[in-house]
Image (cartoon, helix red, strand yellow):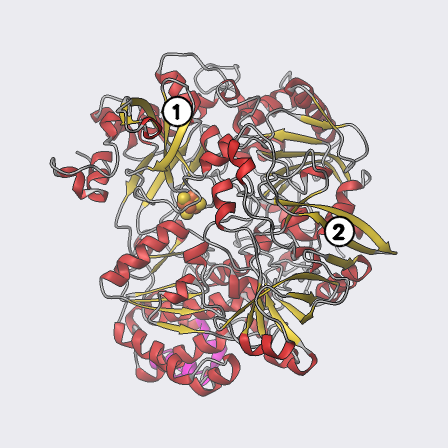
Amino acid sequence: MSDSHPSRVFFEANPAANVASRLADYPPPERWDDWVELDAKSWPRRVEKRYAIVPTTCFNCEAGCGLLAYVDKESGRIRKLEGNPVHPGSRGRNCAKGPATLNQVDDPERVLHPLKRKGPRGSGEWERVTWDHVLDAFAERIRKALVENRRTEVMYHVGRPGHDGYVDRVLRAWGVDGHNSHTNVCSASARVGYALWQGYDRPSPDFSRAKYILLVSAHLETGHYFNPHAQRIIEGKMAGAKLAVIDTRLSNTASMADVWLSTWPGSEPHVLLAIARHLLEQGAVDREFVARHVNWEESLERLAPGRPKSMDEFLAALRTLYDGFTFERAEKESGAPASKIAEIASGIAAAGRGGLATHVWRSAASGNLGGWQVARCLYLLNVLTGSVGTEGGVSPNGWHKFVPTPFSSPPPQDVWSELLFPREWPLAHHEMSFLLPHLLEDGKGRVDVYFTRVYNPVWTNPDGFQWIAMLKDEAKIGLHACLTPVFSETAWFADYVLPMGLGPERHDLMSYETGPARWIAFRQPVLRVAQERAGKRVDFTWQANPGEVWEEDEFWIELSWRVDPDGSLGVRRWFESPYRAGEKITIEEYYRHIFENSVPGLPEAASKLGLTPLAYMRRFGCFEVERDVYRRYEDRPFATPSRKLEFVSPTMSEWGWDDEAVPKPIESHVSRARVDGSKGEFVLIPTFRLPTLIHTRSGNAKWLYEISNANPVWIHSSDAARIGVRTGGLIRVSTEIGHFVNRAWVTEGILPGVVACSHHLGRWRLSDALGNDRWSSALVTIEETSPGVMRLRQKKGVEPFDSPDPDSRRVTWTESGVHQNLTFPVHPDPVSGMHCWHQKVVVERAAAGDRYGDVVVDTRKSMEVYREWAAMARPGPGPGGLRRPLWLLRPVRPSDAAYRIGPAESP
Ligand code: SF4
């Protein structure tokens, strides 16, 4: 039996299944073809139901947990979705959002056919069209752009990627620089911090073997890799690890901590550097690791020029650098007691070498100006304790994520889009996506063909009214298709709404750093697979999916062939079968080639079971390539220019940020000094998640909205008493450009002077008949109440409605939350490019005439704030006339030549 044999993974995850006298937790893989359960609805009669169990992968967050779809052999429909016990990341476990995929599949409100607008954009009139019409309309427009060499005018803007590299390959085949993402409203800040240290932009903590776990923010429990990481954090705790959480809010994660620090937003680096100082003072440093893996000689020259090059000198220079970061100063900055910070520092020091698992992703990093330094300061603790690449430490994600190569790879494009990476932000870790309306308003370009894919910028991004204005302007956006399973605020303003498959209705490859192993998972359209198992021929996934729901992989193949029908543009050849020369590739061939050629060990494991590699993946849905992956620096060094962990970052110095070249605090735009409580000012934390919802992708899940359907503003009891508001009372929260009205939730679980509002809720629709799901949205009006001042007001909240699902008449909740993001101006961080989410706000009791859900925005002010923040940037070009350092990661990286600004292009 191979190491990664599914039965081994299954029985390790389910020891009870080895004992004949007990019930198994999961159906054993060998019985997935014909699984029998008693029908609950027929009770007390014992009626057997037979299922084909088909594995797939959850699409509701990026963790990529395994799911098993129970396809009823009688009805041909999915009966339920549960965990896949042989998935190495999730090991059979899911959060609430995994099984709720069933709601999304059965949602009576979902879009089942392609729609084209009839009236002006946003008028809400739609007609059904054929996929042939859609493909021809877009192919003609894209072909024209390619022929006319307008290769920055085709843009694909993705919210949830959910695939590894498929669309990147499509865009490269077209030769366009058109990949846009949501990352700069998500994680770009932390990524810069990690990338400057190690080249890789994500951390992969080994929680289950850690001796000490330090989390900055709650995202492990409610967001990023929620379930796979959460289960491993608890394993670590059960094995004796201490858990410390730094989070302003008493999150669910904080409630599980041994030590919780509620810190003022933006002060986190002070706390982390006080811990670093303690480690240096106590000598709790892994000197051997630092000597071998850190660019300490280069760093020492920068910190103490001319000093002898020894480790003693380097550590002395660090002690000098961080001398002022005492526990007492950290307390003054953060509000957290010095004794508690010292307790964490002592715990980390006592844990010894190699066993510190840390993590920051969004929250503190994504909320603050300079938040990327939170990741720099946090990872410093791992570096000092030698907890990088170790059992219980943190590895670079690239050591644990497995990305196979497809049958052919188009060359990088020779063109650079300044709408994606404007030269003002040369170190921006991802595309400046949330600035697209502002960049177009500034005349930086035009988009002729725009695909938004599982992306809802009108609702998700800050400054949503700028997005609405841009999407309605045909001079800025020529043709817009929204690829989405459901309607959304953004789809409302599109030219086409194109229904795309949910998690169990499409193919994708997934791999994530959920622990010290490398695995690959196969998302697959379960009805197609079930029908094929039953002997039915299915040529395209949409034939098995509900309605005319396509899977995107097949959409891109068809579209690419129509863009280049005779092959003269050189596009088509990338979509020709590797098995049948000159013929169009099928999606099965695409994945078959990868599984046969690019996944080490898979062909052998499949052969032992008498299966082809593709059949193996169809049957089990995943494959563990390697486990216990540690110390990969022995054969795969860090991806920085020096190939070492970079304490001093020469790149920062060379690109005009010498003052930020070492881990240190940057004063946040919401620091204590900048927020005047005597004027009623607060910091608003608008980013926290609820464990049961995901951004805009869960509005079509009735079970989840039954649990979570409001986002009241957390406010400390002392602040609430001062303002004179109780839980449930209305408050007005005013930002730089507007205000929103929401209910208060009075609690001791947040720092005085800070308020917080979850970012999931507040969905809206403009028509009762069509638009966002009625499970989750309020019916609203949008009016211009005075020149440039827009008001969104709720006409009615959620109420029971008629549909084929009888549950829609049983809806008990009446509110859907408040859309706060509309009132946020853009805050592009001058280094990372991240939108700095935290807001300085004024909180007061609602005024006369205010209504729950009101959102008012003065759109004239939003460009002013944009320009204030843009003025902080330090534009390129950098050394050698480059737009961006060649080594720094960039999605869909163009050729080196495209990085250079030519003489004619120089600013
Ligand atoms: S953590 Fe939940 S939402 Fe995310 S992939 Fe796993 S089951 Fe799905």
Q: Which mark is residue 892?
A: none
Give the x, y percent position of residue 675: 65, 78
Q: Nearer the viewer, residue 317 or 666?
A: 666
Identity of the residue drawn at 57% across and 72% down: 754
Q: Which mark is residue 466?
A: 2
Label 1 is placed on what type of residue? Arg
The residue pinned by badge 1 equals 592
Identify the element where label 1 is drawn: helix
- Disc with the residue nearer the chain's start (1 vs 2): 2
Total label count?
A: 2
Give the x, y percent position of residue 606: 26, 27
Range of residues picked out in magenta: 298-320
* Pointer 1 residue Cβ closer than 8 Å to ligand 1: no
Left or right of residue 637: residue 858: right
Q: Are marks 1 and 2 in contact (CB under 8 Å)?
A: no
Q: Is residue 266 visible?
A: no
Does 532 lie within the magenta span?
no
Identity of the residue drawn at 26% across and 24% down: 46
Left or right of residue 262: residue 259: left
Q: Nearer the viewer, residue 445 or 491?
A: 491
Locate residue 846: give its quadrant.
bottom right
Q: Is residue 171 visible?
A: yes
Q: Dominant secondary structure of the magenta stretch?
A: helix
Q: Establish if 238 lies above or below 648.
A: above
Give the x, y percent position of residue 824: 68, 60
In what quadrant of the picture does the C terminus appear? bottom right
Q: Nearer the viewer, mark 1 or mark 2?
A: 2
Give the x, y percent position of residue 264: 53, 75
Q: For mark 2, does the 10 Å Cα neighbourhood hold few (<14), some (14 to 19), or many (20 or more) residues?
A: many
